[in-house]
Image (cartoon, rainbow, N blue to C red):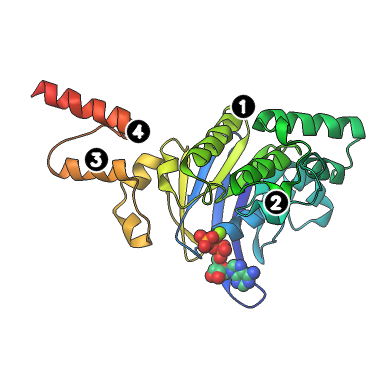
Amino acid sequence: MIRLEKVSYSYPDGTPALENINLAIKKGEFIAIIGKNGSGKSTLALHLNGLLKPQKGKVIIRGMDTRDISKLPGIRKLVGIVFQNPETQFVGRTVEEDLAFGPENLCLPPVEIRKCVDMALAETGFEKYRYRSPKTLSGGQGQFVALAGILAMRPECLVFDEVTSMLDPDSGTDVLERIRKLQRKGKTVVYITHNLEELHAADRIIVMDKGRIVLEGDPESVFADPSLQSLGLTLPSLIELAARLKTCGVAIPWEKTSSPHSFAEEICQLFLKT
Ligand SMILES: Nc1ncnc2c1ncn2[C@@H]1O[C@H](COP(=O)(O)OP(=O)(O)OP(=O)(O)O)[C@@H](O)[C@H]1O
Ligand SMILES: [Mg+2]
């Protein structure tokens, strides 16, 4: 659904941010992008719906080139981005107004706009905040409204740039669970995070460094790669624990490393066997 071919980008002040990126994202995929600060993740995200355009190479969204201005409305309808600081995205006086803004920009008729807003509020469980001013919401609540705002535009692909970083663990888990639900319903998800604990069930992880993709694969193979630490990334604690146990001859199967519960169960089984 999304294809980046040999994409390079430098900011107007000359800072290089992307170097020869090749990436294909399939419909329905949950793809995670990780990498230390300044590695180019957000710049890549901004290329996915034409907010930034490559200086070299091209970005194709379902056959549409983001450099073609006439295609931008179609591209923005297909790909929605949620950023880390939701308050910078609020435009309405109430949550409802805010959610209507995107569909209005797509020039949908009023009946359709209402349907989009209702659906987005229902999907995020935020009906009760319909008439609240978005500026009065907490960070976590605001993040849900930002998510609802993107959903109201019914994009097929959702890009999340560090949306859980300011949330408490419960709210973070809740947002991630809602995102996973959307993916199970068929949406394509591009998920940028510093929290590798969230990625056990990703279809694919892309690791960026200095504007390049330096590692790519399913979570099991990426987390097993010895270069991860030198890229400034810390393994999820259960994966690290499994790796250490392995050096002592204790093998914990990958699927058991997804939660403390399954990990503990496996350890108990091993004890019972001995
Ligand atoms: N508006 C800008 N003008 C100039 N340089 C920028 C701008 N935005 C980002 N950069 C630079 O581009 C490079 C990539 O930045 P980017 O924001 O894409 O990284 P990131 O991986 O998202 O980092 P973080 O994890 O901190 O969010 C960095 O060197 C950064 O300093
Ligand atoms: Mg960023």
Alpha carbons under labels 2 and 1: distance apart: 21 Å
Whether residue 87 is situated above or below residue 141 in the rendered picture = below
Front of the two marks 4 and 3: 4
Lower sequence index among marks 2 and 3:
2
Which one is nearer the viewer's eye here, 102 or 213?
Answer: 102
Lower sequence index among marks 4 and 2:
2
Quickly name the residue at label 1.
185
Residue shown at 67%/67% (left/top)?
A: 55
Disc 4 secondary structure class: loop
Alpha carbons under labels 1 and 4: distance apart: 24 Å
Which one is nearer the viewer's eye here, 117 or 266?
Answer: 117
Whether residue 19 is situated above or below residue 169 in the rendered picture = below
Quickly name the residue at label 3.
242
Residue 229 position in % (x across, y down): 32, 57
Residue type indicated by callout 2: Asn
Disc 1 secondary structure class: loop
Front of the two marks 2 and 1: 1
Residue furthest toward the bottom? 13
Alpha carbons under labels 4 and 3: distance apart: 12 Å
Residue type indicated by callout 3: Ala
Residue type indicated by callout 4: Ser
Alpha carbons under labels 1 and 3: distance apart: 32 Å
Quickly name the residue at label 4.
259
Which one is nearer the viewer's eye here, 244 or 173?
Answer: 173
* Ligand 2 has an atom within 8 Å of the beta carbon of the residue at disc 1: no
